[in-house]
Amino acid sequence: EVQLVESGGGLIQPGGSLTLSCAASGFSVSNNCMTWVRQAPGKGLEWISVIYSGGLINYADSVKGRFSISRDDSKNTLYLQMNSLRAEDTAVYYCTRDLFTGSSGWYVYWGQGALVTVSS
Amino acid sequence: DIQMTQSPSSLSASVGDRVTITCRASQGISSALAWYRQKPGKAPELLIYDASNLQSGVPSRFSGSGSGTDFTLTISSVQPEDFATYYCQQAHSFPITFGQGTRLDIK
């Protein structure tokens, strides 16, 4: 059974750093396209970043230069390193896996979400 | 960036009603469109991909159509579990973008 479990969320002051983890089971993160999507409280969904099986990476402009996506194939875990956090980064962060192993942009598996609150 | 605009933003329906939600892309995206259902406090669920392909395990009352810039999601007979928020999403080009959401409420 495919499962994604996020951890690492919490309350952080503006300008601070936080790393989210997404532990995967039932498949290999190294063979799949993995994406982070976030949702601010009461708002819609926002695509943040993707890492392809081959290692290619892309970011939304809103986080480029501040956030970094990575994976540890030995731990079968996806990460999102978040630096220089702002109040507008407050959101539930979801890790997702694509429907197809190559790449598709169709997010079929989602974690339960990790809440990040940026506030002083 | 490709803007995705859903209409309506909210609608009310009764169990058994037929419901249609529209999504318009700011430029042509071929059939690179998905629909998701999100229940309160839960992660979104993929319903439709490639504009009209029903994801495995999704009830057949859901259907999608369209290509280019105009797309629709239809629920043929709304069930109690369908009262939720629906999002469209384009996968044609980066950045991936979502519609603002359509909230389906009980009438």
Image (spheres, helix red, strand yellow):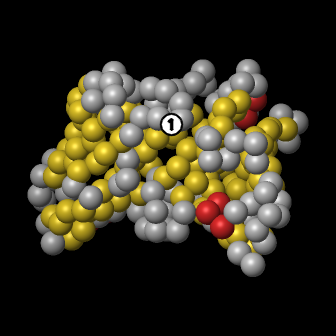
Which of the chains bears the disc numbered 1?
Answer: B
- Residue B96 position, x and y percent, is 50, 36
Instruction: Give the residue drawn at x 27%, y 42%.
Output: B23
Instruction: Check the image and report above or below for A24 versus A10.
Output: above
When the figure is inspected, residue B73 is found, relative to residue B51, above or below; the finding is below
Residue drawn at point x = 76 percent, y = 68 percent: A14
Assess disc 1: are there few (<14), some (14-19) or many (≥20) residues with their C-alpha within 10 Å of its C-alpha.
Answer: many
Given the current orientation, which residue lies at the most extreme bottom position?
A120
How many numbered circles are shown? 1
Helix, strand or loop at disc 1? loop
Left or right placement of residue A64 versus residue B91 in this view: right
**Amino acid at the residue labelled 1:** Ile
Residue, far right: A74
Percent across and percent down for residue B73 are: 24, 42
The location of residue A73, given as percent across then percent down, is: 83, 34
Q: Quadrant of the N terminus of chain A?
A: top right
Up/down of B33 relative to B17, above or below? above
Figure quadrant of the C terminus of chain A: bottom right
Give the labeled residue for mark 1.
B96
Q: Is residue A61 visible?
A: yes
Q: Is residue B86 left or right of residue B94?
A: left
For this rendering, which residue is in front, B3 or A18? B3
**Residue drawn where x is 60% and y is 21% of the image:** A102
In-front residue for pair A48/A97? A48
Residue B93 appears left or right of B69: right
Along the viewing direction, whichever of B25 and A2 lies nearer the viewer: B25
Left or right placement of residue A3 versus residue A68 in this view: left
Q: Position of residue B10 (x, y in %)?
A: 24, 62
Residue drawn at x 46%, y 31% is B91
Please say whether residue B55 is visible from this viewpoint: no
